[in-house]
Amino acid sequence: MIAPTLDSQSIITYAHGMLSALQRTKWRLTPTAAIASLLLGLAMISSFFLLLQRQEIIEQAADRIYDVAMPTMADATRMVRGLERLARAGEGLMWIEDINQRQQIRLALVSIAEDGVLQGDPEIRATIQSAFALLDENLAALAQHGKSARNQCLERWKPLAQKLFDLSEVISSTASIAAIDEAERIIEATRDSRDRMLRLAAAMLVFLAVSVSMLMWLIVRPLTRLSRSLEQAQAGLYGASQEEVFREFQVVADAADVLAAGHRALAASKEQLELMAHTDVLTGLANRRRFIATAENELSRHDRYGYVTSLIMFDLDNFKQINDRYGHDGGDAVLRAIGTGLVGLVRRVDLLARIGGEEFAVLLPEQGQDVAMLSAQRLRAAVEAMAISTATHTAIRFTASFGVAEHLSGESLEAFMNRADMALYEAKSTGRNRVIVAPSVAKDQPLDTPST
């Protein structure tokens, strides 16, 4: 049976009916859009807390390296060098014939033996005392009998020298094992964080695939049916009921609304995740990953166009003492103060980042070392003026040491940061709370600009 042909008035009425149906039924999928947005929000919040938790674990492991492993390695190195030098010098004294020169070398060995790290261990202290007792006995024998007593003195010294070497080997091995343990903790935390992120990414992909499948089912299926109805209407036939066509339009319109809401939620989630991946959670500054990526791009531009670029690296002085006295909450408050108090003292094109536990860096594009030194002095004075209130109504005051370097043509980012880092440690070793400019090709010595 052939369906009746629609006249122009029926077509107009038909179109108005479809438009009214679309406008009336848009609200039907609003709960669906709300549920989808809620699920996306929960996924984003879960991702944020997961990233925060893993970053805190990694930062705690890094803090242990700064607070424990590095000082332990430094003390162990001094102990090993002192013990080995005492062992070798004790044997070398047997071959020196000048009595005055022997006494001078002995006095130098006394200053080494009196090092606090050597005297702090009872076993090492007792061994050093035995070594000096035997050394004085050998020197007395050499002064009385001359070369004829040398072989006897050397034979007496060899067992004690071997004991000194054995002690140095034990100290070095113990410190190395401790450093390796701390490094393995960071590696384990990093691997666990990577695995969790992979599982989270897989879950997000599954959620996205299910969402896309549902949207495709909601849109493609009614569009196919609607296409057939419109083809019949275009031919002037009335093969499908108005209610069926209206329903197809309603489903398409509602699905489009849901798709638009989901797209907006996904865009917001992506932007938030990207922000978390490049931001230090505690201070709100750029993290090390973002700093390295930005600095690499800036140095490439520097080498390509000849632009000048400078770097400021600074480290809080005696930060471990702040943590020991005020706890980690006090230390965190100091780090947050750096993030909020210094960001307004650099240009919009400069990049201020936290790259370590209490270590920060500022990248200054198109600025030479003279201007960078002045900027570093301004930051140093701002840090010195800061005061953090505590629960006991006492104020935490602190300072920072700064190293400044200007990029050399063709220099890698690692070498660039190492030069600024060397200047930073020179500032610490020469009194702290000061700015040191690293030497460049044209300058043999760093420029020391202590605080006044």
Image (cartoon, rainbow, N blue to C red):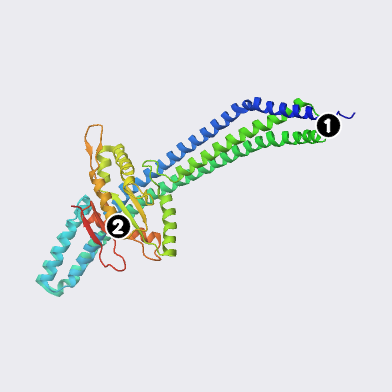
Give the residue type at disc 1: Leu
The mark lying in front, picked from 1 and 2, is: 1
Q: Where 274 sits versus 81, above or below?
A: above
Task: Work out whether residue 298 or residue 209 is closer to the camera in this orientation and state it.
Answer: 298
Res. 206 image quadrant: top right
Q: Is residue 225 visible in this depiction of the protein?
A: yes
Residue 114 is left or right of residue 40, and the answer is left
Res. 110 image quadrant: bottom left
Residue 440, percent from left and from top: 31, 65
Q: Where 178 sits versus 422, above or below?
A: above
Task: Work out whether residue 274 or residue 22 is closer to the camera in this orientation and state it.
Answer: 22
Residue 371, percent from left and from top: 29, 57
Residue 11 is left or right of residue 422, and the answer is right
Q: What residue is pinned by disc 2? A: 371
For label 1, the crowd category at 10 Å Cα-Cα, with few meaning under 14, some 14 to 19 and many 20 or more, is some
Task: Work out whether residue 269 or residue 52 is closer to the camera in this orientation and state it.
Answer: 269
Q: Where 451 sits versus 227, above or below?
A: below
Gap in angstroms between the C-alphas marked 1 and 2: 81 Å
Q: Secondary structure at mark 2?
A: helix
Residue 55, percent from left and from top: 42, 42
Task: Work out whether residue 218 or residue 277 is closer to the camera in this orientation and state it.
Answer: 218
For label 2, the crowd category at 10 Å Cα-Cα, with few meaning under 14, some 14 to 19 and many 20 or more, is few
Q: What residue is pinned by disc 1? A: 237
Tell me, for residue 398, which label it has, or none: none
Residue 336, percent from left and from top: 33, 41
Residue 142 is left or right of residue 297, and the answer is left
Q: Secondary structure at mark 1?
A: loop
What residue is rendered at 80% in x and 29% in y? 240
Give the residue type at disc 2: Val
